[in-house]
Image: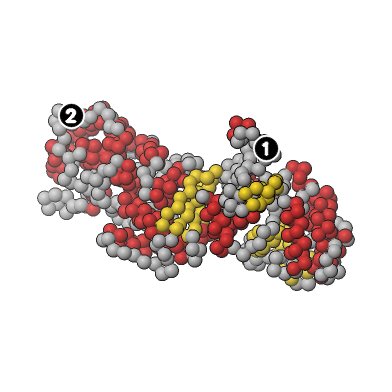
Amino acid sequence: MIINALVNRYEATQEIPPGWQRREASYALELSESGEFLGVMPLGNPGDKNPRLTLTLPSTGSGRSGKNAYETSYFLCDDGSYMFGLDPRKFTSAQKLHTELLSNIDTPPARAICAYFKSGLPALPQGMDEKEAQKQKFIFMVDGRRIDYDDCGAEIRQAWEKWEASHKSGGERKRCLVSGKYDTVIKLHDKVELRGVSMGKTPLISMNDQTSFRSYGTTPKDPPAQIGTETAFAYVTALNDLLRNEKHRQFIGGDTLVYWAENGNGAEEEVFSWTSQIKEDDADKLESLIKKAAAGRLFEFEGCNLDSRFHLLCLSPNSGRISVRFFHTDSFGSVLNNNIAHYQRLEIYKAGNDRFRHLPIWMILNETTVKKQATDVAPLLGGQLYKSIITGGRYPMTLYQAILNRIRAGEDVNKVKAAVIKAVLMRNYDEKEVTTVALNTHTSQKPYVLGRLFSVIEQLQQRASGGGLNATIRDRYFARACANPASVFPTLLRLSVHHAAKLDNSIFYEKLKTELLGKLDVQSAFPPVLNLDDQGRFILGYYHQTQEFFTAKKDKGEQDNV
């Protein structure tokens, strides 16, 4: 399904013919019509630190490595090792390729390029060292015209396409499993440019050299799949185009998500982008969308077809080949509804200024790490979380446990952590009673009440000490209170009596503490162990009660903010 969807994408949107691909180049070698080297010209925006321009250039095929690097030059665009002869063997390879293809073509670009390679090793331009030249990609410019697909001329295009087809690594002609047409089965698929892979490129489909991973009767010399040359070119071209386009990709930790609508008009991708990776500027638009969904009203976007098939492909870098985390296809309306439902489950009250009303995924993932950095997120977690959101499935328990672990380690129970716990309890445990946006004062659910009680005792201690403590009861006892209430709460209640005695007016807290204790069963008020979902209810009760303290006034007419 993945390859078929990508081939359909190529057929619907691409104009790049077989043998060509979109590639970036940094500089152009300026040549006169006689092949004289005049200098280098930066491509792209002159003000950029590393200016680059994306052009349609000859395909690099399956790449090169090791000894193959000294025999394989790229046509019309390569790095300085080949173009300037920083390595004479590589320059000889480039010279041989270009002479073979262009010597019989009588056009100004062909004559100039052949003359350039016949004139011997050129000198590096002033101001450019060897290290920089080896990193950068160079194209040719003859008489002020860049030599790419559009300006190289029909003769050069035809010569390259004929040469590339004759040298393509393929096997016998068989029926392609994707297109159903008879085609030459390709052995080495072109590489995909994915963030995080070694050398920047790696194949999506390849043959593993280990016997235990090969199909019965196959060897590493056999094709990895019965896929024709045309199909292989189409899916790689479409995928690379999606990965390069910021409107069709998002980064989730170490993974990359690409998405596209089957009709290919771009409106669906734009809406999905701002609803899935929410930014501060989009908060009002998303809020309006959520309110419409909550009221059961229809929503429409200009140019969007909610019935259009929408594809989402999550890829992860790996050695040897790309790993597919998930591939999901559904109507665009269904994907959008699942996104909105996710934000509704995350909705939770926070006192004071709130920078993000709706939590983006990167913020959720960062809360699972010690340093709050995306690079530290567990490798599989980003893809698992995204898949659960867009499919409307259960949240990954690794997310829930990671949040609990950060809280047990002594981190604050902030809005993000509490919102994730609320969402997991709602979706995974079908919890409705305590998963409210703000404090639920009516429930007698024991873990939730215990969390509220812990918050009350903590507030008593803080007010009694004037807020000057180095370590509060939350720092010392929260992890145990959350998991093993019976081992901690009797001690906490005794301490609360001493804290209350230090306050001139502790009536509000004492009444609230008595009210909460009254909701607990006297015989088993403090259970010895709370399971994972009850620990989440405990934390939610603690968070809700703490936020309530930040906004509520004391009872009986006392006007001080708590």
Residue beneath the point at 30% across and 32% down: 531
Q: Nearer the viewer, residue 289 or 438?
A: 289
Which mark, by number, is residue 524?
2
Residue 190 x %, y %:
65, 50
Q: Whole-percent x and y of residue 278? A: 41, 58
Q: Is 272 placed left or right of 348 in the picture?
A: right
Amino acid of disc 2: Ser
Q: Which residue lies furthest to the left in this view?
A: 556
Q: Nearer the viewer, residue 276 or 269?
A: 269
Q: Eyeballing the image, is 317 above or below 139?
A: above
**508 and 332: which is toward the camera:** 332
The residue at 40%/47% (across/down) is 388
Vertical order, 397 against 362 (above or below): above
Helix, strand or loop status at disc 1: loop
> Which secondary structure, mark 2?
loop
The residue wearing badge 1 is 220
The kind of residue tagged 1 is: Pro
